[in-house]
């Protein structure tokens, strides 16, 4: 089943790394309450069931739904894009949901993914439900703590997560080749990370459409000598599109980072409240 969401695909040049203070970040909080991603997802599910009574709809994560057709085809798609557009213009909720449902009309068309569309995305481990059948499981690896890295694809206007077996068969590539291609594609889309040196400041990486946190999957970004000045890099990937960076030697900065991560728990787009430190070419959870 082909499945596209209203919202737009990859955005070139996803934001710049900038140095910000705690007060600036807090000032960016939303001025008005929004429905949660779970409520948005449930409204979408209800709309799909109403429009397509024969479809099977299964919630697989806070922001992901698996939709199956009568021919046995199915796809798991994220609602990241649609929810991001709702956050920008809440009064358009009904129109956004309607557009999402209308895109399911292409259900009989086969899913087509090319190597150039592959990306890696960082998501909570709970994004993949326990007991998910291997035939439907996307290609993924643990990152650290409660985060994983998945291979997804630009479905035109949505991230899609094709099963690993289908990717291998369709692309005629093995897992290593798929990972390499996805990382190469992603490196062109994520913001750069500044070398903070000995300055006592937080750097924030921002972008759009759920791809900024993918910077954690790029080893070449974090393992350079310049990134070790001031201690090992410490990150707080508080949302899919906001990653805060500081260095381990800055004790006050790390404490501020921890406070920001804790406050992000109420954000509908929160990714994790854990902090991670880069040591010996790998991420580790930074203990409290």
Image (spheres, grey):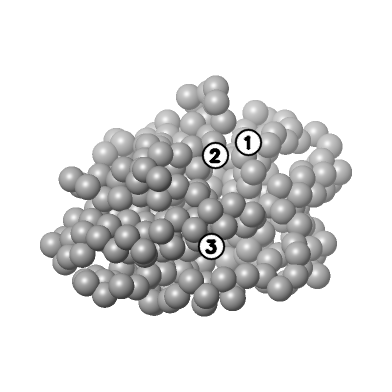
If the image is split into quadrants, where does the N terminus sit? Answer: top right
Q: Where residue 137 sits: x, y (%)?
A: 49, 31
Count of numbered badges drawn on the protein:
3
Front residue of 116/95: it is 95
Disc 2 vs disc 1: Cβ atoms closer than 8 Å? yes
Q: CA distance from mark 2 to mark 3?
A: 16 Å
Q: Where residue 147 sits: x, y (%)?
A: 44, 42
The residue to which callout 3 is attached is 209
- Label 1 residue SS: strand
Left or right of 209 in this view: 7: right
Disc 2 vs disc 3: Cβ atoms closer than 8 Å? no
The residue to which callout 2 is attached is 127
Specify few, some or many for label 3: CA neighbours under 10 Å numbering under 14, 14-19, or 20 or more. Answer: many
In the rendered image, the residue lying farthest to the left is: 225
The residue to which callout 1 is attached is 60
- Label 2 residue SS: helix
Front residue of 9/40: it is 40
Q: Where residue 87 sits: x, y (%)?
A: 68, 66
Residue 139 appears anywhere in the view:
yes
- Label 3 residue SS: loop
Q: CA distance from mark 2 to mark 1?
A: 7 Å
In primary-sequence order, the first of circles 1 and 3 is 1
Name the residue rendered at 64%, 54% in the picture: 266
In primary-sequence order, the first of circles 2 and 3 is 2
Name the residue rendered at 45%, 47% in the picture: 274
In primary-sequence order, the first of circles 2 and 1 is 1
Eyeballing the image, is 260 above or below 178?
A: below
């Amino acid at each position: 089943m082909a499945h596209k969401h209203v919202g737009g695909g990859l955005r070139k040049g996803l934001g710049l790394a900038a140095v910000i203070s705690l007060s600036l970040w807090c000032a960016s909080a939303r001025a008005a309450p929004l429905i949660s991603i779970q409520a948005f997802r449930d409204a979408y599910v209800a709309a799909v069931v109403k429009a397509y009574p024969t479809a099977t709809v299964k919630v697989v994560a806070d922001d992901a739904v698996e939709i199956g057709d009568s021919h046995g085809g199915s796809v798991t798609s994220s609602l990241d894009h649609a929810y991001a557009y709702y956050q920008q213009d809440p009064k358009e909720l009904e129109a956004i949901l309607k557009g999402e449902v209308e895109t399911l009309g292409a259900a009989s068309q086969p899913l087509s993914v090319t190597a150039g569309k592959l990306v890696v995305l960082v998501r909570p481990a709970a994004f993949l439900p326990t007991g998910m059948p291997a035939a439907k499981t996307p290609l993924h690896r643990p990152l650290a703590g409660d985060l994983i890295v998945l291979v997804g694809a630009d479905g035109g206007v949505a991230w899609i997560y094709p099963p690993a077996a289908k990717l291998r068969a369709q692309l005629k590539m093995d897992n290593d080749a798929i990972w390499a291609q996805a990382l190469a594609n992603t490196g062109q889309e994520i913001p750069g990370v500044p070398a903070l040196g000995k300055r006592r400041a937080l750097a924030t990486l921002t972008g759009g459409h759920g791809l900024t946190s993918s910077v954690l999957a790029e080893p070449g970004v974090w393992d350079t000598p310049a990134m070790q000045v001031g201690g090992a890099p410490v990150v707080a990937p508080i949302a899919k599109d906001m990653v805060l960076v500081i260095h381990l030697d800055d004790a006050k900065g790390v404490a501020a980072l921890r406070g920001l991560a804790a406050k992000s728990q109420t954000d509908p787009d929160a990714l994790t409240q854990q902090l991670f430190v880069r040591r010996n070419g790998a991420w580790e959870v930074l203990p409290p």
